[in-house]
Image: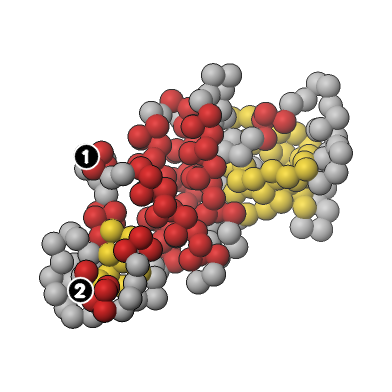
Amino acid sequence: MNAIIISQVKINETDLLLTALLDDDETIKIKIPGILKSKKRSTNSFYPGSVLSFVIANPTKNILIPKEHELLYSPVGDTTAYDSLVNLEALLAPLKLSYVQNSLEIYSLLFSLVKDWASFEPVNQHYMIDRFYQIIMKQLGIFHEETICCKCDKLLNNNGLFYFHHGIMCNSCRSANRLSASHGIPQQWFQLTFENYADIDLRYSISIRKTILQYIKSP
């Protein structure tokens, strides 16, 4: 079976516990015994974002132990920039939350991103992260592309702000409802294309992702 590593944690002085997304859309736990003390094996093969092929030996309750494994693709290399690793962490963050349901669409898209991750320019990585978050939001039914204020029905000229539990609002209705502009998601963010992504402030984009993750944690 093929899997994308979502996260890894040390469960004692010798073993790693991986959370992995399978190519059949299932999420599983995989234990790698003795890897932290091994002089022949490296933990680099199990870096989050790596794509591996596993042959499973004996399942232990809900945790699988691989008999064999092969690294197919790695998102990191000897010269991978720190920013690239930070961006990779941001890409994988939604999949660590139990509210997000995996699917073949999620796996296929994630696979297409991580297998070439180290070769992407930082701005391309940020664009891909935002598009991935939009797909997660669509899956959860919280992605909105309305062009009319949810309160007054005013036609918005790409200048509305979206609020969870409310919808997209014009500035007047936002103020009337005492909602902070800094907590809203700009309407234009929902209409991202690669051509217009240069217009997005990356600091604001990072803030938007944090807002989305916070909502997913406590919908």
Q: Does dot 2 land on a helix, a strand or a loop? A: helix
Q: CA distance from mark 1 to mark 2?
A: 30 Å
Residue 26 visible, this angle? yes
Q: Position of residue 111 (x, y in %)?
A: 49, 40
Give the mark nearest the N terminus, 1 or 2. Answer: 2
What percent of the width, then of the height, locates residue 80? 53, 24
Q: Which mark is residue 176?
A: none
Q: How is the image coloured?
A: secondary structure
- Left/right of residue 175 with respect to residue 60 in the rendered view: left
Q: Residue at point 83% right, 53% down?
A: 60
Q: Say which element carries label 1.
A: loop
Q: Is residue 166 above or below residue 108?
A: below
Instruction: Name the mark on residue 172.
Output: 2
Q: Nearer the viewer, residue 23 or 203?
A: 203
Residue found at x 74% / y 26%: 42
Q: How crowded is the residue under tag 2: few (<14 C-alpha within 10 Å), some, or many (20+)?
A: few
Image quadrant for the N terminus? Answer: top right
| Residue type for callout 1 | Glu
Q: Is residue 148 above or below residue 2?
A: below
Mark 1 or 2: the one toward you: 2
Q: Are marks 1 and 2 in contact (CB under 8 Å)?
A: no
Q: Can you see residue 103? A: no
Q: Is residue 174 above or below residue 70?
A: below
* Residue at (59% x, 54% y) in the render: 96
What residue is shown at x 81% (from left), y 33% (from top)? 35
**Which image quarter: residue 123?**
top left
Label 1: which residue? 195
Find residue 137 and report its horizontal and vertical position in percent. 41, 61
